[in-house]
Amino acid sequence: MTPAPAVAFLDVNETLSDLAPLADRFEQVGASRHLLQTWFASTLRDGIAHAASGGYAEFRRVAQAVLLTSLAEVPHLTTPPDEAAEHILAGMGTLSVHPDVPPGIRALHDAGVRVATLTNGGAAIAKGLLERARLEDLVERNVTVDEVQRWKPAPEPYRHACRTLDVAEGDAVLIAVHPWDVHGAKRAGLRGAWLDRAGRPYPDHFERPDVTGRDLPELARALVGQ
């Protein structure tokens, strides 16, 4: 049996946070709520493009630029584009965690696994999310790609996170809902755990996860051998 990881790094956006309420903010400025998914995917695309080309821009800057481009195509905004973008982005600081997150983090912590976050977003967003969920005392560190100026899934953020927590890559696991993030962690030498809430097939062109679960407690049990 594979021993439990010493440290579990949790992705933040979508893995921990539920982005669905942001759809209401799109509607409030006169845009379609369905624009949320396109905007977020395009934000990831552009941030990852920076990483692939050796560049960097912080999450909020990329998210805002993509949002302004998306809103420019909306014919009847009820709010000026700059204000609409700010209204939507402000919602990132009000989000809640998915229901499975608190028991999952507690299960990891109770099993002796150190817990940290590793996000393409800002540390303040991760910190606020955990504080609202009353989980901040269970999370040792909020690591962000800002610290290495390179977005996941480039190897630098994963290796930096391991150095920051003083753990060998092979003794750490990255938990994420995004297969590309699991793939990046595996390529960087970490273990990978895929949180598959939607029951979708894992892309076969990526490195396979070490464990898969439909919710975070299930993943925690798999990781600690329960």
Image (cartoon, helix red, strand yellow):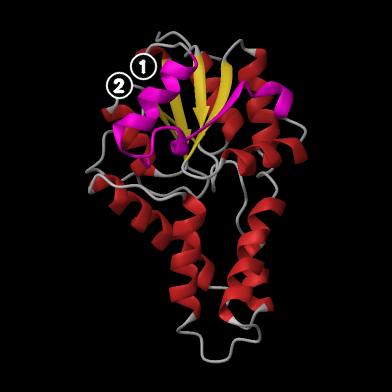
Range of magenta residues: 136-165
Q: What residue type is labelled 1?
A: Glu
Q: Pointer 1: what residue?
A: 169
Towards the viewer: 84 or 26: 84
Image disc number at residue 46: none
Question: Toward the viewer: 53 or 182?
Answer: 53
Q: Which residue is drawn at 40% across and 10% down?
A: 2
Q: Do the residues labelled 2 and 1 touch (CB within 8 Å)?
A: yes
Q: Residues within 10 Å of mark 2 (few under 14, many from 20)?
A: some
Q: What residue type is labelled 2?
A: Gly
**Which of the 4 quarters of the picture holds residue 184?**
top left
Relative to 155, 31 lies left or right: right
Q: Is residue 164 above or below residue 85?
A: above
> Mark 2 or 1 closer to N-term?
1
Q: Where is residue 205 in the image (x, y as percent from the top left)?
A: 22, 43
Residue that label 2 marks: 189
- Secondary element type, mark 2: loop
**How far apart are the two marked residues, 2 and 1, measured between alpha carbons?**
5 Å
Report crowding for label 1: few under 14, some 14 to 19, many 20 or more residues within 10 A (C-alpha).
Answer: many
- Compare residues 62 and 10 and report the one nearer the observer: 62
Residue 36, position as x, y percentages in the image: 53, 67
Above or below residue 181? Residue 49 is below
For residue 95, side relative to residue 161 (left or right): right
Q: Where is residue 4 in the image (x, y as percent from the top left)?
A: 48, 11
Q: Which residue lies furthest to the bottom in this view?
A: 76
Q: Which quadrant is the N terminus positioned in?
A: top left
